[in-house]
Amino acid sequence: SAVISQKPSRDICQRGTSLTIQCQVDSQVTMMFWYRQQPGQSLTLIATANQGSEATYESGFVIDKFPISRPNLTFSTLTVSNMSPEDSSIYLCSVERPRRGMNTEAFFGQGTRLTVV
Amino acid sequence: GQNIDQPTEMTATEGAIVQINCTYQTSGFNGLFWYQQHAGEAPTFLSYNVLDGLEEKGRFSSFLSRSKGYSYLLLKELQMKDSASYLCAVRDSNYQLIWGAGTKLIIKP
């Protein structure tokens, strides 16, 4: 298993401001994943964060809006920049670990519930 | 495009059995996962299928048919604590997880 500590758990922010979400893993991992989950919708991958290189962003997500840091193998941050009400969502960090009998299993942080007003 | 379909919401009675279906169209297949997500919490792993057939784990079972692009999660002896969303996810040929929108399961006494 993996223990992932994500904070803040929730925040209410003014539009136009930025929020940085932190994710700490209990052991080293090569890749960390950042997801967004809007109400009633599926998990959407924002980007994959690799230590020592720039994050890889999925279609529809750009670095200027969602800058990511990955300073070491156990920590990453996601910043939601210049927020608007459309950014209100749950943001989740995730890592994958090998699991007996399968390739890898995804583990998630507790999530950050963001409300932009 | 890649797509995972599952019902939006289902209702069942405590002590009964419920089957949650998932159909998928993805570019390649490297396994199918079911996750449980209680309201306000992160998803947690339930089951994994990569070969056709039924995987049983206590009250929960998961079935896969790769030729049909179909899976189901079967929950037996339902308990109130089983009220949650159940997410189906497929790992594609790029080893990326593609997620369904989730099925909200409501358990009534």
Image (cartoon, rainbow, N blue to C red):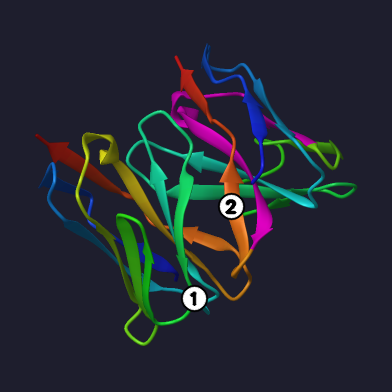
Could you tell me which secondary element the residue under label 1 belongs to? Answer: loop
* Residue at mark 1: chain: B
Q: Position of residue B2 (x, y in %)?
A: 44, 69
Report the disc number at residue B50: 1
Q: Which residue occupies 35% across, 78% down?
A: B69
Q: How far apart are marks 1 and 2 (CA)?
A: 15 Å
- The region drawn magenta spans A75-99
Residue A80 visible in the snapshot:
no
Q: Which residue occupies 64% across, 20% down?
A: A18
> Dot 1 surroundings within 10 Å: few (below 14), some, or many (20 or more)?
some
Q: Mark 2 points at which residue?
A: A106
Could you tell me which secondary element the residue under label 2 belongs to? Answer: strand
Q: What residue type is labelled 2?
A: Ala
Q: Are marks 1 and 2 in contact (CB under 8 Å)?
A: no
Instruction: Tell whether position A76 is magenta.
Output: yes
- In depth, the one of A112 and B107 nearer the eye is B107
Residue extending farthest to the front is B58
Q: Position of residue A36 (x, y in %)?
A: 52, 40
Residue extending farthest to the bottom is B67
Q: Where is residue A104 in the image (x, y as percent from the top left)?
A: 63, 62
Q: Which residue occupies 34% across, 49% down?
A: B86
Q: Is residue A31 left or right of residue A16?
A: right
Q: Is residue A15 left or right of residue B104?
A: right
Q: Which amino acid does label 1 sit on?
A: Val
Image position of A103 with respect to B109: above or below: below
Q: Where is residue A26 in the image (x, y as percent from the top left)?
A: 75, 36
Viewport quadrant of the C terminus of chain A: top left
Q: Quadrant of residue A103?
A: bottom right
Q: Which residue occupies 39% across, 46% down?
A: B36
